[in-house]
Image: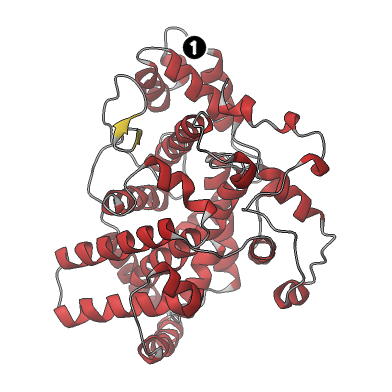
């Protein structure tokens, strides 16, 4: 039985049949919900709860076929690199999968995609800090959400490899801009999707996976939350550091990650289309989730900050600047998470927010000033792009789908790629 059939929506006859999970609590009114005008009867609450038990049937069927057929992973790689019609005989799951992902949705706007990619790249060190100290950390704060990581790999020792793989995917996508079919961004995103399918199928068979408490492994709600982490939450992390994107840039980034995450398998009806919808989705998730970090959350946090220190040590630059950036990263996490949650996650101490806030004020002023003239704006964007790429310069570990350090498919061969 595949993960797709094990957790298909057809097994859930109604929302009343859904058993309460630790990932979910009955929504309670909050100031944020009131400010955004979201009532507790909003239909998205029911849809998000249902998403806890929904996987990615197209990718799950491909993963099941690969597992059942010797050399299946190599055939998939060939189909991804050269096209599915390059195969002598096309398996039915491959045909369905590639027919879907190669039909570009009608709503994709290439101009918005390019502008979104440029906006992400221009964030420089501000953006890479936002990704590490805010986006990833908010994901780590939910104890049930980190269980796939906890059960499939080294929580702390594998952090550098995970960061490198995520960096590879982020850079591949941004440099591909519109993610055409033959781009590295397209291929990296599809490989990430398949990695999720392999993990979902593996965890679904484990007796210690608590589906009643956690939902399906890497289910649709988690996948949509990942979209938020790289778009709405990323922009909030940048704003906290002084880089406040314009309305046009915000909407371009949302559109850019909307297509990337559609390609990664997020159901279209779950996806936030605008920055406002992203804020609303985040508010709903916060209203139905307990931020209760556990030992796994703390282990991931230690691994992340340790790997960041190691990567920073390998970079050129003054030691005082590296120390300052480390302090600033911890202060940003504490600002966005609260000290209560940060302490439970073992975020490094940062007694004063002053260095962060003072730096944010300077960055805000400099960004606005440099953006006034075309020449200075071009210099600002070029510098940010260079710093972003340098900070996220990944080691090429190759791409072998692994769980706990072991290949999850037979006859795996490393190829250039990534897994987020």
Question: Does residue 6 appear left or right of residue 395 in this picture?
Answer: right
Kindly give the residue lying farthest to the front in the view shown: 208
Q: Between 216 and 74, which is closer to the camera in this rendering?
A: 216
The one of 361 and 22 positioned closer to us in this rendering: 22
Q: Residues within 10 Å of mark 1 (few under 14, many from 20)?
A: some
At which x and y percent is residue 99?
A: 57, 24
Q: Which residue is mark 1?
A: 90
Against 387, is 401 above or below? above
Regarding mark 1 in the picture, which secondary structure is present there?
Answer: loop
Residue at left offset 66%, top offset 55%: 272
Instruction: Give the colouring mode of the picture.
Output: secondary structure
Measured as percent of width and height from the top left, residue 407 is found at: 31, 29
- At 82% from the left edge and 59% from the top edge, which residue is drawn? 42
Residue in the image at 53% along x and 25% along y: 98
Q: Is residue 189 above or below residue 390?
A: above
Q: Nearer the viewer, residue 110 or 291?
A: 291
Q: Is residue 71 left or right of residue 230?
A: left
Provide residue 139's location: percent of width, then percent of height: 49, 59
Image quarter of the N terminus: top right
Q: Is residue 55 left or right of residue 297?
A: right
Tell me if 388 is positioned left or right of 54 in this view.
left
- Residue 78 appears anywhere in the view: yes
Residue 109: tell me if it is visible: no
Residue 118, by quadrant, is bottom left
Q: Based on the displayed image, in which of its 4 quarters is residue 281 positioned?
A: bottom right
Q: Is residue 210 above or below residue 277?
A: above
Q: Residue furthest top?
A: 88
State how many labels appear: 1
| Residue 391 in the image, given as x and y percentages of width and height | 27, 63
Measured along the vertical axis of the image, is residue 156 above or below residue 399? below
Foreground residue among 342 and 4: 342
């Amino acid at each position: 039985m595949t993960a797709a059939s094990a957790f298909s929506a057809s097994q859930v006859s109604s929302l009343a049949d859904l058993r309460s999970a630790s990932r979910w609590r009955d929504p309670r009114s909050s100031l944020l919900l009131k400010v955004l005008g979201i009532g507790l009867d909003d239909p998205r609450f029911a849809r998000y709860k249902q998403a806890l038990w929904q996987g990615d049937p197209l990718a799950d069927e491909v993963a099941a076929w690969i597992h059942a057929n010797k050399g299946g992973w190599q055939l998939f790689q060939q189909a991804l690199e050269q096209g599915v019609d390059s195969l002598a005989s096309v398996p039915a799951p491959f045909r369905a999968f590639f027919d879907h992902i190669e039909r570009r949705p009608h709503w994709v706007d290439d101009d918005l995609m390019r502008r979104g990619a440029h906006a992400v790249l221009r964030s420089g060190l501000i953006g890479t800090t936002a990704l590490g100290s805010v986006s990833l950390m908010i994901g780590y704060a939910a104890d049930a959400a980190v269980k796939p990581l906890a059960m499939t790999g080294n929580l702390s020792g594998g952090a550098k490899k995970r960061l490198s793989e995520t960096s590879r995917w982020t850079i591949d996508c941004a440099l591909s801009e519109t993610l055409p079919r033959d781009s590295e961004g397209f291929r990296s995103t599809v490989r990430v999707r398949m990695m999720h399918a392999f993990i979902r199928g593996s965890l679904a068979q484990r007796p210690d996976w608590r589906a009643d408490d956690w939902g399906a492994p890497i289910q649709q709600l988690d996948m949509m939350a990942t979209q938020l982490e790289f778009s709405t939450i990323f922009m909030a992390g940048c704003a906290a550091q002084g880089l406040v994107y314009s309305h046009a840039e915000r909407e371009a980034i949302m559109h850019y990650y909307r297509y990337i995450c559609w390609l990664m398998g997020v159901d279209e009806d779950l996806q936030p289309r605008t920055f406002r919808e992203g804020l609303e989705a985040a508010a709903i998730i916060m209203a139905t989730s307990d931020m209760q970090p556990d030992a796994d959350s703390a282990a991931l946090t230690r691994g992340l900050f340790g790997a960041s220190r190691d990567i920073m040590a390998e970079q050129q630059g003054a030691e005082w600047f590296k120390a300052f950036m480390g302090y600033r990263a911890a202060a940003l996490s504490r600002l966005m998470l609260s000290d209560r949650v940060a302490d439970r996650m073992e975020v490094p101490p940062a007694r004063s927010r002053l260095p962060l806030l003072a730096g944010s004020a300077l960055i805000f002023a400099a960004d606005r000033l440099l953006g006034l003239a075309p020449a200075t704006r071009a210099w600002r964007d070029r510098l940010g792009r260079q710093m972003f790429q340098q900070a996220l310069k990944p080691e090429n570990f190759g791409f072998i789908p692994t769980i706990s350090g072991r290949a999850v498919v037979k006859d795996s061969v490393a190829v250039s790629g990534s897994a987020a």
